Image (cartoon, rainbow, N blue to C red):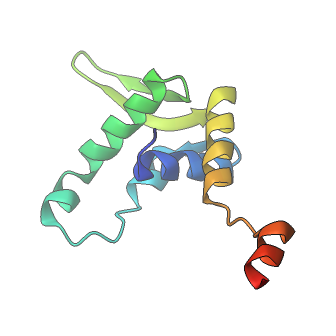
Amino acid sequence: MLSKLQQFILEACVEGGGAIARSVVDKNHGHSSSKAHQEHYKQIVTASIERLIERGLLVGYGTKTAEKFFITKIKLTPRGQKAAHECRKKRQQKFPTMYSYVRSKH
């Protein structure tokens, strides 16, 4: 199960042609009015990206220091493309079948 943020990250990668800069995700602060959310947004995004990398849905590129790894670019893996496609499929509205339409009329 993917969170809304993780789904957004995958969707942004799909829209960006498979790879995007980290700054694209950082610019989306959402519509939350919570101060805690705004203050720790980068940490939350980093944790979400790292979890997607651990699951094999993304590949992260960046620079590594002695203490930290700074992700500057992310790219979808084939598994990530499939997951993004599944998320889109779940969100897509479904039309009622003809059978259910006819049945409800009677």
Q: Can residue 53 be seen in the rendering of this structure?
A: yes
Q: Can residue 16 be seen in the rendering of this structure?
A: no
Pick whichever, 8 or 104, lies toward us: 104
Residue drawn at (25%, 43%), measured in percent from left and top? 43
Indicate the position of residue 20 as horizontal and vertical percent values: 57, 45
Q: Quadrant of residue 50?
A: top left
Residue drawn at (27%, 69%), measured in percent from left and top? 32
Residue drawn at (24%, 15%), measured in percent from left and top? 66
Q: Quadrant of residue 68?
A: top left
Residue drawn at (49%, 54%), measured in percent from left and top? 24
Q: Quadrant of residue 79?
A: top right
Query: In this rendering, would 28 be left or right of 67?
Result: right
Pick whichever, 67 or 16, lies toward us: 16
Residue found at the far left of this picture: 36
Query: In this rendering, would 95 be left or right of 7?
Result: right
Query: In this rendering, would 32 be left or right of 102?
Result: left
Indicate the position of residue 80 as horizontal and vertical percent values: 61, 33
Indicate the position of residue 88 as horizontal and vertical percent values: 65, 53
Q: Is residue 31 above or below residue 77?
A: below
Q: Is residue 33 above or below residue 83?
A: below
Question: Could you tell me how many numbered marks the image carries?
Answer: 0
**Quadrant holding the C terminus:** bottom right
Residue found at the far bottom of this picture: 105
